[in-house]
Image (cartoon, rainbow, N blue to C red):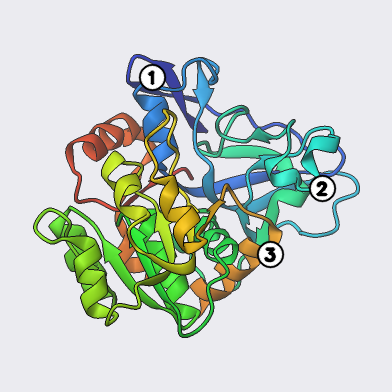
């Protein structure tokens, strides 16, 4: 059995995966596939060395088959196919107000704890969501990022008939756009990469390239001046932050999806003038996984088109390097079985 272990210095080594017998309310999984997330790339680049142990088994976008269950487990059985919600809830704090998914003592499995890029993985039973027969394990590995998108759209309170602008057309941006579209919203995607724009168009989305088009002017033209009811900042870029306040209409919403580790200038006057709201959106809750699974099983998320490549775990180092070298790619999966 094998595992992908971050060693530091842009190195992911293939090591042994130890089968850990499940304790009470734990489940041991035979991992099928694990997606590579933007966070994994940040770890690969050394940007999270202060947080991530070395060596650390990476990966949190995983699908698996239940191999063994511990005492007290009754939500899954051996042989069930599952997606993993990789959150280890810590001791509740008054600060949390009951929202354990962003609680003070939350540990993220695959960052703070060993992740799913390994053949055998033991996790708490509450992290597991059964996959229907309609979903392959490859598509099951896409449920975690799809749940992020479902949470973001839910936090943005998107309803049918609204106009949404998504800034950034990577995996999460595309999934947000598709989820919002399924809610009945009109979606305009802003992205600088033409290959990703072409993909978005093939998925039925309206697109704009800020490299050669003024995005606020284009949104005004497309909406006859109404502008956007909800804007999702997914690019993580300074230009994305700059343009996001130019797009909402009166009492519109801005959902901050991307991680901005350094402060960036924000036009606060726009919030005052039009009573705009900005909403932070981080991770997901149980209901977001349920919605993601339902949408994926119904074929609404076009997961086949979002998976760029599937590689064996032996090629994990090469795959991370490939992602660095190929900005056109969307989602790379590692086969862990």
In percent of width and height, residue 258 lies at 43, 45
Drawn side of residue 321 relative to residue 95, left or right: left
Q: Residues within 10 Å of mark 3 (few under 14, many from 20)?
A: few
In percent of width and height, residue 154 lies at 59, 66
Drawn side of residue 77 relative to residue 195, left or right: right
Q: Secondary structure at mark 3?
A: helix
Disc sitting over residue 98 in the figure: 2
Question: Alpha carbon of mark 2 to alpha carbon of mark 3: how far?
Answer: 15 Å
In percent of width and height, residue 336 lies at 46, 43
The residue nearer to you, when weighing 115 against 204, is 204
- Identity of the residue drawn at 41% across and 63% down: 175
- Identity of the residue drawn at 74% across and 30% down: 105
Location of residue 97 (image quadrant): top right
Location of residue 129 (image quadrant): bottom right
Q: How many marks?
A: 3
- Identity of the residue drawn at 24% across and 51% down: 329
Residue wearing tag 1:
46
Question: Is residue 99 visible to the viewer in this orientation of the structure?
Answer: yes
Identify the mark nearer the N-term, 2 or 3. Answer: 2
């Amino acid at each position: 059995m094998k595992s992908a272990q971050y060693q530091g210095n842009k190195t992911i080594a293939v090591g042994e995966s130890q089968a850990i017998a499940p304790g009470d309310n734990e489940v041991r999984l035979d991992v099928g596939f694990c997606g590579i997330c933007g966070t994994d790339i940040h770890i690969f680049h050394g940007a999270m060395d202060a947080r991530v142990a070395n060596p650390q088994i990476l990966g949190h976008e995983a699908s698996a088959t239940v191999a063994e269950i511990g005492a007290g487990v009754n939500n899954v059985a051996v042989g069930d196919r599952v997606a993993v919600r990789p959150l280890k809830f810590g001791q509740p704090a008054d600060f949390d107000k009951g929202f354990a998914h962003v609680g003070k003592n939350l540990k993220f499995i695959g960052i703070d704890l060993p992740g799913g890029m390994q053949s055998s993985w033991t996790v708490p039973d509450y992290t597991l969501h059964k996959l229907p027969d309609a979903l392959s394990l490859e598509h099951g590995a896409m449920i975690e990022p799809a749940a992020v998108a479902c949470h973001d759209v839910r936090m943005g309170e998107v309803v049918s008939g609204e106009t949404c602008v998504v800034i950034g057309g990577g995996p999460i941006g595309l999934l947000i756009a598709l989820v919002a579209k399924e809610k009945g919203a009109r979606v305009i995607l802003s992205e600088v990469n033409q290959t990703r724009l072409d993909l978005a168009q093939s998925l039925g989305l309206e697109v704009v390239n800020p490299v050669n088009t003024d995005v606020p002017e284009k949104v005004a033209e497309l909406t006859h001046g109404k502008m956007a009811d909800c804007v999702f900042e997914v690019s993580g870029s300074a230009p994305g932050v700059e343009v996001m306040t130019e797009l909402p209409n009166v009492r519109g919403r801005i959902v901050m999806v991307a991680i901005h580790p350094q402060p960036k200038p924000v036009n606060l006057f726009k919030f005052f003038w039009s009573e705009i709201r900005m909403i932070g959106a981080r991770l997901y809750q149980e209901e977001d996984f349920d919605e993601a699974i339902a949408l994926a099983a119904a074929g609404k998320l076009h997961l086949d088109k979002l998976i760029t490549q599937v590689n064996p775990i032996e090629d994990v180092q090469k795959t991370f390097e490939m992602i660095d070298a190929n900005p056109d790619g969307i989602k790379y999966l590692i086969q862990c079985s």
